[in-house]
Image: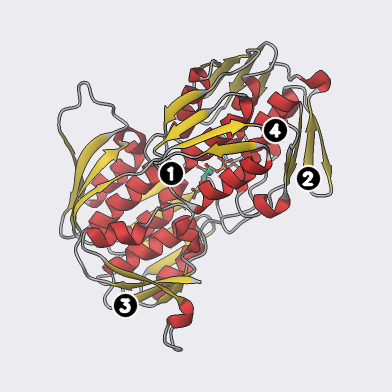
Amino acid sequence: MDTFVIEGGRRLSGTLRINGSKNAALPLLVAALLTDEPVTLRDVPDLADIRNMVRLLGELGCERIAAPDPSVLTLKVHDATQSHARYDIVCTMRASISALGPLLAKRGYAKVSMPGGCAIGERPVDLHLRGLRALGADITLSGGDIVARAPRGRLQGAKMFLGGQFGSTVLGTANVMSAATLAVGTTVIESAACEPEIVDLANLLNSMGARVTGAGSPRITIQGVDALRGADHTVIPDRIEAGTLMCAAAITNGDLVLENCPLDALMAAREVLSAAGVHIAELGHRVAADPMRVSCRVTCDRVLKPAEFTTQPHPGFPTDLQAQFMALLTLADGNSIITERVFPERFLHVAELSRMGARLLRQGATVVVQGVRQLVGAPVMASDLRASAGLVLAGMAAQGTTIVHRVYHLDRGYEKLEHRLCAVGARITRIDDKDLPAADA
Ligand code: EPZ
């Protein structure tokens, strides 16, 4: 298994480009199931989750048409008879649940293995099912699979409330919105997720001929159409990668320019960074520019200040940046308070950061971070994608060597992260843990 060996204490400086968003790209890829024509996506990151999704879509009869540029993916359905998303793929990637709505809407039938829990919590799919049932789907559970049928082959538009006890659902909204594009009549989703990834999906669906309005707000309206066509779409840049690299600049007291940065999607995170003494200056003039693709320079005060934040659905502070910001605030001069309201159990990084000298006190869904002057390198274990990113950040700031085990978690969401960080001054080596000295293995 791959491991990172990080020599801490090196200041980052230089320019990095933000890649296309993983979490936008996954449901965009699945939208290819909604049409018989080719769908081309540009700026798709080369990640394990993306490759798994392409494999799943292949099993569902949607083939990839070869293109010279690996970041361009063209998918086209050639066989609409296979509608089973099997357990062995779904268990590697929960986003496979996104196939349920499109399969059901286009083929009238879908069988998708029920995703289990994962390192960040239970992760139920009841809201996905509630939304699809509201569209008339008949849904049962059989042998661990969700089996869904559209009566007489076609879903029916409906008005529905899609909020749950933790707020809106991103992939649930994506699933129902995608399915409703081919339903008969009008669908209104109340308490829809407002994430930029939902807006990106609505934009792709509309360029395929769908009639979706209100995406980015809590009420999305979809007027069903009879068929969708192919499209060519560029994926939005990854706001979580951007936020992670902002923390990388700040935690190393560095100076990074981020290009293709979706600043408008990071307002809550910017507030916290600003409170902590991290400065983000937009480069160039905005008037005609796309606020989702700007260049900015990230620098910070020599001493970080403490800050408080609570994760919430967008436009609140993203749960996917909680671990990285916790790593950053371990070095602030004072006490910070972090509360997790999206996945209240998403704290596996707390114990690992503590191994590096962080002073963290968890009470339920809140962690008090008592800033320390210095983190100390240690062997640590990555537990999920964003926790791994937090550990890499901590390792870059720590004194001495940090060994991050199980970086396959990180590879699910960050393309060649170590190469990119090394290009701006970090010292990170990827090795197989078999090659570690016995004491560190
Ligand atoms: C998406 O997961 C992202 N994944 C997650 O990113 C992200 O953490 C999450 O949204 C929240 O922003 C992808 O886009 C592939 P939710 P999703 O449904 O859609 C509860 C990463 O690190 N809920 O918005 O599965 C749920 O338990 C990943 O890149 C229900 O109760 O998350 C949670 O508390 C990890 N019932 C809250 O809603 C449901 O049916 C929000 O989850 C669905 C969700």
Q: Nearer the viewer, mark 2 or mark 3?
A: 2
The CA span between labels 4 and 3 is 51 Å
Q: Nearer the viewer, mark 1 or mark 2?
A: 2
Q: Which mark is residue 79?
A: 4
The residue lying furthest to the bottom in this view is 438
User: Which picture quadrant has residue 124?
Assistant: top right
Picture coordinates of residue 360, whole percent (x, y): 41, 66
Kind of residue at disc 1: Pro
SS at badge 3: strand
From the image, tell me which residue sits under label 3. Answer: 401
* Ligand 1 falls in quadrant: top right
Of 402 and 354, the residue lying toward us: 402
SS at badge 4: loop
* Horizontal relation, residue 327 to residue 373: left or right: right
Give the residue at x 43% y 71%: 3
SS at badge 2: strand
Q: Nearer the viewer, mark 4 or mark 1?
A: 4
From the image, tell me which residue sits under label 1. Answer: 318
Q: Indicate which disc, 4 or 3, sits on the residue closer to the N terminus.
A: 4
User: Which picture quadrant has residue 330?
Assistant: bottom left
The CA span between labels 4 and 1 is 38 Å
Give the residue at x 49% y 63%: 408
Mark 1 crowd level (few <14, some 14–19, many ≥20, 10 Å Cα):
many
Picture coordinates of residue 71, whole percent (x, y): 41, 42
Q: Nearer the viewer, mark 4 or mark 2?
A: 4
* Horizontal relation, residue 76 to residue 147: left or right: left
Q: Indicate which disc, 2 or 3, sits on the residue closer to the N terminus.
A: 2
